[in-house]
Image: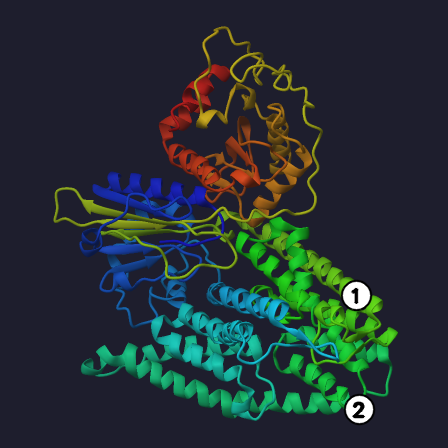
């Protein structure tokens, strides 16, 4: 069973490899796939019941409650491709999953079960954090939009420029529902973060701990610890539960441990620890920051505005943010409205900046993140800074510094011009309603701050992605965020995970059941998966104009426009028969997109050469853009599949219709494949954004499965000319 943001091709490769290995070892195997293109070959309850063991590879937490009593082995997808037979043998001696330990049932257990011999997975902390963020996002979006809509449609302007929704009105009730959503946001983040580490017993302590963290009154603070406090309580709850599970208890107590003992003990211990130990420093920070700001009111307005902007942007609802906000709001009554003006300019910068970043560099974000970005833009207009929390929680090292930079700029500009705000609220809405003095500079400060945040976020995220790409390029697919494969010897592994990762689109899950021939029925279940959502674009990667050629000796570029099956094909061999070429991959791969000899000597040059080959179809509007997107995909994790195969792919509007290219390299191209082989058979898939869903996945799935056939690969390598290559490729169905 797997869940991972990229690499569906590896999922099918691993499934085919495990199937072949099981057959060679005398087993029967059944493979189930679940994900973006739906469930296929679904395993029954009988498959699971008859299983002797389960092999799972995943980059996030998965629900393994069905496998209680089964032997469980967790690995990375690279191991499923490279050592499938060894995995089937190893699972026979794997530890039995009891459902109450930190074994294979949790993210922590998955990492422990994988061992040093498996393909590398995302860290436990990363997977747990993404799990919490993915569950938090709907609460942020629903709560924030309901509050914004109720203010826009039901708010009555006041003399001071504020908005008030009359008590008992329809829109007041809508607003209250939105507030509930926002209130639940922090506990949900904490609870599902804990769940990813400690499984179901950690859910209650995680959620209650998150509620305590967000309720400052419980530990003598005027402000709660916000989403940062929720992350702390989530990790504490998860690992506390994992530790309690290891305590030996009498057999008669074991049945009530996960439903009574562990939740009660963990919740009580965590709650009291936060109130008496962590909460006191939070209260101390709030009190002393307020006093420190009070001593700065007579200092430079620019410096004070920058500091307030930094504080507003730091934790978005946490103690630092609330200190700055309440400090500004408290001075309104004394007649000093300039401090609130600085805060009001900084408040919308974070959601507006993060939303703008998803528009500026869409390919750096998953589809879910893009949708959250649109909601954040809307929330920003109404001064709801929490719209940026999902981005900060998912990428704190990149987003929080960018938010603080933009907030400081906005606050400093507002302070320089003496912008005022007569109401304790921020964002463009208060300026539209007349509460702000110095409106032109206020809007300038908001816009500049948001742009600075967006540009800084894009730069930092892009830098981080390129750093990951360099690591994956040096270590191969074993370090790339590729999907994993789960195999159960004796029974099926099926069904979707109970969670869904950030930001990406739907994950893919595979399962297979295997039984030894001529023996007591049993099976090996394999699960693998991945998702192709959210291709990311990195800067760089040039590209020649469409239609230019390399001038290779085979005359690959010297074709003339004509029918898809006619004219002079890319390898220079004239078509001598009027019969149409066989249809390959729904007609996306034709004689015009086949090259018998790839001239490039490295990955980047090969991708550029393939992009130019695709341009010959007339379906590519921007070769350079296609190259950049394909290289950005490589930065996420190599598309070298092993067995001398590479399948670079891109989702971009630089192509007007799906196109698939194929080329052979005599010398081979270093592609960072998991088995260390150079790529000699290279397929390139390019699809427009609008067609990037099931069609993209379907092409990858068909290719990946067929390319595991050694005979098919041999026929491709030995084919003489384009016609024979197309005849071999026509076997892909």
Q: In the image, residue 138 lies at what x, y percent?
A: 50, 64
Write the residue at 70% across / 65% down.
402
Front residue of this view, candidates 655 and 110: 655
Q: Say how the picture is coloured.
A: rainbow
Write the residue at 61% across / 52% down.
364
Residue behind mark 2: 295
Q: What kind of element bears circle 2?
A: loop
Choose the circle earlier in sequence order: 2 or 1: 2
Q: In the image, residue 238 lies at what x, y percent?
A: 42, 75
Write the residue at 45% across / 87% down.
271
Q: In the image, residue 148 lies at what x, y percent?
A: 60, 68
Left or right: where 312 falls relative to 529: right
Write the residue at 43% across / 70% down.
192
Left or right: where 175 falls relative to 294: left
114 in relation to 733, above or below: below
Disc number for residue 443: 1
Nearer the observer, disc 2 or disc 1?
1
Q: Tally the numbered discs.
A: 2
Q: Are marks 2 and 1 in contact (CB under 8 Å)?
A: no
Quadrant (top left, top right, bottom left, bottom right) of the C terminus = top left
For label 2, count other residues whose C-alpha is less than 10 Å away and answer few (under 14), some (14-19) or many (20+). Answer: few
Q: Quadrant of residue 172?
A: bottom right
Residue 129 can be seen, yes or no: no
Q: In the image, residue 525 lies at what x, y percent?
A: 27, 50
Front residue of this view, candidates 631 and 339: 339
Mark 2–mark 1 distance (CA, rounded to whole Å): 28 Å
For label 1, count other residues whose C-alpha is less than 10 Å away and answer few (under 14), some (14-19) or many (20+). Answer: some
66 in relation to 314, above or below: above
């Amino acid at each position: 069973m797997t869940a991972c943001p990229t690499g569906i091709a590896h999922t099918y490769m691993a499934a085919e490899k495990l199937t072949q290995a099981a057959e060679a070892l005398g087993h029967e195997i059944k493979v189930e796939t679940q994900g973006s293109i739906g469930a296929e070959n679904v395993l029954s309850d009988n498959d699971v019941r008859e299983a002797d063991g389960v092999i799972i590879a995943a980059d996030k937490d998965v629900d393994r409650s069905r496998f209680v009593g089964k032997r469980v082995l967790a690995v990375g997808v690279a191991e499923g491709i490279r050592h499938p037979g060894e995995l089937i043998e190893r699972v026979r001696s794997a530890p039995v999953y009891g459902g109450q330990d930190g074994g294979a049932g949790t993210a922590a257990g998955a990492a422990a079960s994988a061992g040093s011999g498996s393909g590398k997975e995302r860290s436990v902390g990363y997977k747990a954090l993404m799990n919490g963020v993915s569950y938090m996002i709907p609460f942020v979006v629903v709560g924030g939009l309901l509050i914004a809509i109720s203010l826009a449609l039901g708010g009555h302007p006041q003399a001071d420029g504020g908005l008030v929704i009359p008590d008992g009105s329809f829109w007041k009730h809508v607003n209250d529902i939105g507030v509930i959503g926002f209130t639940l946001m922090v506990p949900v983040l904490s609870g599902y973060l804990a769940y990813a580490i400690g499984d179901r017993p950690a859910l209650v302590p995680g959620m209650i701990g998150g509620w305590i963290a967000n309720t400052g009154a419980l530990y003598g603070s005027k402000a709660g610890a916000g989403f940062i406090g929720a992350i702390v309580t989530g990790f504490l709850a998860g690992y506390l539960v994992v530790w309690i599970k290891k305590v030996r208890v009498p057999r008669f107590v074991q049945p009530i441990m996960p439903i009574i003992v562990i939740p009660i003990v963990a919740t009580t211990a965590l709650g009291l620890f936060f109130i008496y130990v962590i909460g006191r420093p939070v209260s101390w920070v709030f009190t002393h920051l307020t006093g420190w700001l009070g001593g700065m009111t007579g200092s430079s307005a620019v410096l004070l505005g920058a500091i307030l902007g930094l504080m507003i942007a730091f934790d978005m609802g946490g103690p630092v943010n609330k200190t700055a906000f309440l400090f500004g709001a408290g001075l309104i009554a004394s007649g000093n409205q300039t401090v609130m003006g600085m805060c009001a300019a900084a408040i919308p910068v974070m959601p507006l900046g993060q939303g703008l970043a998803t528009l500026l560099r869409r390919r750096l974000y998953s589809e879910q993140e893009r949708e959250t970005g649109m909601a954040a833009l809307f929330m920003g207009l109404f001064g709801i800074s929490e719209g940026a929390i999902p981005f900060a929680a998912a990428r704190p090292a990149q987003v929080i510094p960018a938010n603080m930079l933009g907030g400081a700029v906005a606050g400093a500009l507002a302070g320089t011009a003496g912008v005022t705000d007569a109401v304790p609220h921020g964002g463009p809405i208060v300026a539209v309603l007349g509460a702000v003095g110095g409106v032109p500079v206020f809007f300038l400060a908001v816009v500049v701050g948001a742009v600075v945040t967006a540009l800084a976020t894009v730069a930092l995220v892009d830098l981080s992605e390129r750093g990951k790409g360099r690591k994956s390029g040096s270590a191969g697919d074993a370090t790339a965020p590729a999907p994993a494969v789960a195999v159960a010897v004796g029974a099926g592994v099926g069904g979707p995970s109970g969670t869904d990762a950030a930001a990406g689109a739907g994950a893919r899950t595979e399962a297979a059941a295997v039984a030894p021939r001529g023996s007591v029925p049993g099976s090996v279940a394999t699960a693998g998966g991945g998702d192709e959502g959210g291709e990311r674009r990195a800067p760089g990667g040039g590209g020649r104009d469409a239609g230019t050629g390399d001038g290779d000796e085979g005359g690959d570029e010297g074709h003339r426009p004509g029918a898809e099956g006619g004219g002079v094909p890319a390898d220079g061999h004239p078509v001598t028969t009027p019969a149409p070429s066989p249809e390959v991959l729904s007609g996306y791969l034709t004689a015009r997109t086949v090259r018998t000899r790839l001239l490039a000597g490295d990955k980047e040059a090969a991708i550029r050469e393939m992009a130019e080959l695709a341009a010959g179809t007339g379906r590519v509007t921007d070769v350079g853009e296609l190259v950049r997107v394909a290289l950005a995909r490589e930065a996420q994790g190599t598309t070298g599949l092993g067995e001398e195969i590479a399948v670079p792919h891109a989702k971009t509007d630089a192509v007007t219709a799906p196109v698939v290219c194929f080329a052979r390299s005599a010398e081979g191209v270093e592609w960072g494949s998991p088995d260390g082989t150079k790529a000699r058979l290279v397929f390139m898939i390019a699809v427009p954004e609008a067609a990037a869903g099931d069609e993209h996945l379907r092409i990858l799935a068909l290719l990946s499965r067929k390319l595991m056939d050694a005979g098919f690969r041999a026929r491709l390598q030995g084919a003489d000319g384009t016609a024979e290559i197309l005849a071999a490729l026509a076997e892909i169905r």
